[in-house]
Amino acid sequence: MSEAKASMSEAKASIDKETVEQVAQFGGEHYKYGFTTEIDMDRVENGLSEDIIRFISAKKEEPQWLLDWRLDAYERWLTMEEPEWAHVDYPKIDYQDLCYYAAPKSMEDGPKSLDEVDPELLKTYKKLGIPLIEQEMLAGVRKVAVDAVFDSVSVGTTFRDELAKDGVIFCSFSEAVKEHPDLVQKYLGSVVPKSDNYFTALNSAVFSDGSFVYIPPGVRCPMELSTYFRINEANTGQFERTLVIADKGSYVSYLEGCTAPMRDENQLHAAVVELVALEDAEIKYSTVQNWYPGDADGKGGIYNFVTKRGDCREDRARISWTQVETGSAVTWKYPSCILRGDGSSGEFYSIAISNNLQQVDSGTKMIHLGKNTSSKIISKGISAGRSSNCYRGQVSVHPKAANARNFTQCDSLLIGDKCAAHTVPYIEAKNLSALLEHEATTSKISDDQLFFCQQRGLDAEEAVALIVNGFCRDVLQNLPMEFAVEAQQLVGISLEGSVG
Amino acid sequence: MSSLLDIKDLHAGITDKPIINGLSLSINPGEVHAIMGPNGSGKSTLSYVLSGKSGYEVNGGEMLFEGQELAEMTPEARAIAGLFLAFQYPLEIPGVTNMTFLKTSLNAIRRGRGEEDMDAASFLRLAREKSRALGMDDDMLRRQLNVGFSGGEKKRNEILQMAMLEPKLAILDETDSGLDIDALKTVAEGVNALRSPERGMLVITHYQRLLDFIKPDVVHVMAKGQIVKSGGPELALELEKSGYAEYVGGADAASAGSPAHA
Ligand SMILES: Nc1ncnc2c1ncn2[C@@H]1O[C@H](COP(=O)(O)OP(=O)(O)OP(=O)(O)O)[C@@H](O)[C@H]1O
Ligand SMILES: [Mg+2]
């Protein structure tokens, strides 16, 4: 406990890089982003009720239709049961003991221009390596626009004006509701219905913010878009929504990153992401998920219960998910593609790492509805420590989906002999012309490989990081260049302590 | 003159099985020593024990590298101190390019010595220069480490790593086996290029042919975990003619393939 206090006071002291490193050392943890920001927060009392939902909606000055939509979701949620089929095990969550809205006081009057954002918040993001001041983007580096979400609200979005020149809309969800209500109303819930599952119903009732993207017809988005999610407050849940719409013939590459302080209690993150790709449009969606994973004994960490789905709504639309999942105590997440348009395609590239007592149940669903649709799944699961790592995937070909193609490659790598890896593929072909391939391997890092690396000067952890990065190469290559290096380092860091 | 490597009465092996039985050997800076010996006599084991592979235990004696006891150092610390082993069976690491591996290794060793990482441009230049000198295509640098490499290419790749790391003591475990005659010459040139008054080498081989190209100062015969004879280069020629029969008589000659014992 005194360690936690020390790390808090350190974080306040100064904001240079050294401090971040110092903080990371407290508690002997490898997690670099475990600091807390001390800032005045506006938070509602714990508990979930119609009143809380009305409060959130009012706070955001939402139109009546959206409040009704939320209340309907809440009513359905009340009748639903928490899913138990996943290969994860965690104590029952008391939904009345969570806070559903927490925002920095300085954000009270709604989103401001970046110049007015509380300096303490800007510092927090700077410490996380995410500059929100546009001028601070390094010269020579390709521009990346950022929407920064802090607990329940977006605190700022960069490069909006520049993007607007091309007609690209990139803003917080709350602003989109106000400024582009027609688009929001048309697409919200059109990919992931409110009551799709327990967590989507909960999210639909209480979601507080997130990002909104619209790319107009024929536009190739001129820069990477990204959202950086930060949970800071104790005992809060984060329920964000992301909605990305790529209109006909457009292209966008979008990345999300996530971190949270080290806390002894578990915290809930239940997000919904909806992607809509219209005719000939392409969406590349990448995630680097680095929520606090809990300590070596499994204390604390984020419950990451997320529903992500993309709809290739029209012909030849393309959606590609790439995820690097290294954080969270428990992950429950299946980014999926509905291949509705003829000739549409979906891809899923995944690296899921579990160490210590982390539990991962992740995978994808590829639903082939249109003719000549194709999908590709490359999943790399790495388990270390006493963790459990499950790939759960579904490929289903509907009767009308003539000439559907799927290729699935599912590889597991085990480090040590106390961890577990499971592969649960469901394949369902209702059209005889479907061609589905599935390959799976399980391997271990051999002592001989480790020794070979050590003989060349690497210590055991560097050796594991190198070998695992090699194992994940096919997936890492799919990340936008700007994030590939960071992801590689993260792979190494998240496996620290797994050997020796 | 103080030796580079000084092994005294070394006893080592795997659990319950002694393999090195009281071996002594001393290499001075600038010297090249060759070890020859029948299959199973413990040559590779000696190289593993010196470089610190887990699973091998030292049960007695000492092995000093520039006066430091190797047994007290981690494998990577030995590499950082300048000990290099060219493996008899080089390992594959899928997904890691040769280039990445070389760079990671070189920089790990530099950091271990308190030096800065080599900048990317200098590294690239160096890697190209060294690989070309060994007659390797630039393409080899982009391929995954030893994956799909022919036996000879793997051996050549070991020498490339050695050339990049410039160790003080290089142990070459049967680097010549699997090499065609031209490759043997290029590899030998690579090794000779590293010969210098500060460096030592321990060359494990079955064939006199390699020693035509890499002239040893001392040749040792190893049998049953000991050095049973040492001499000049002429000893290798002698062995080529008469084989190991004279050294492997006695209690468990069978393991060395001698039919003499009943
Ligand atoms: N890990 C091990 N487990 C069991 N036996 C081992 C192990 N390592 C070495 N040995 C045994 O120790 C003996 C020496 O092996 P080593 O590989 O050192 O021989 P070598 O001299 O290098 O032979 P070669 O010329 O065939 O390469 C052999 O009998 C071998 O089977
Ligand atoms: Mg051998």
Image: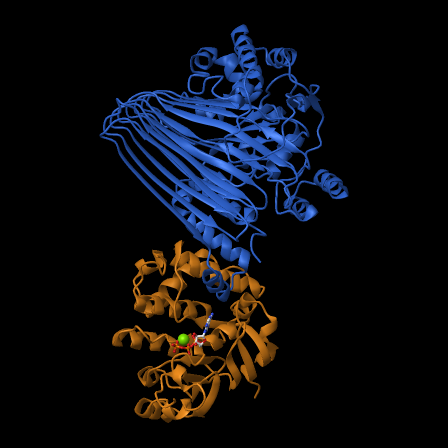
Chain colours: A blue, B orange
Vertical position of residue B54 compared to residue A281: above or below: below
Number of numbered labels in the structure image: 0
Q: Residue furthest top?
A: A64
Quadrant in which residue A238 is drawn: top right
Q: Residue at x 31, y 65 (%)?
A: B136
- Ligand 1: quadrant of the figure: bottom left
Q: Residue at x 47, y 25 (%)?
A: A273
Percent x, y of residue A71: 56, 10
Percent x, y of residue A129: 57, 39
**Of residues A16 and B57, the one drawn nearer to the viewer in this rendering:** B57
In the image, taking residue A435 as reference, residue A223 lies left or right, namely right
Does the rendering let one see residue A284? no
Q: Residue at x 57, y 41 (%)?
A: A358
Can you say which quadrant of the picture contains the C terminus of chain A?
A: bottom right
Percent x, y of residue A242: 49, 24
Q: Residue at x 35, y 81 (%)?
A: B206
In the image, taking residue A278 as reference, residue A232 lies left or right, namely right
Percent x, y of residue B57: 56, 73
Does the rendering let one see residue B38? yes
**Of residues A316 and A397, the one drawn nearer to the viewer in this rendering:** A397
Can you say which quadrant of the picture contains the N terminus of chain A?
A: top right
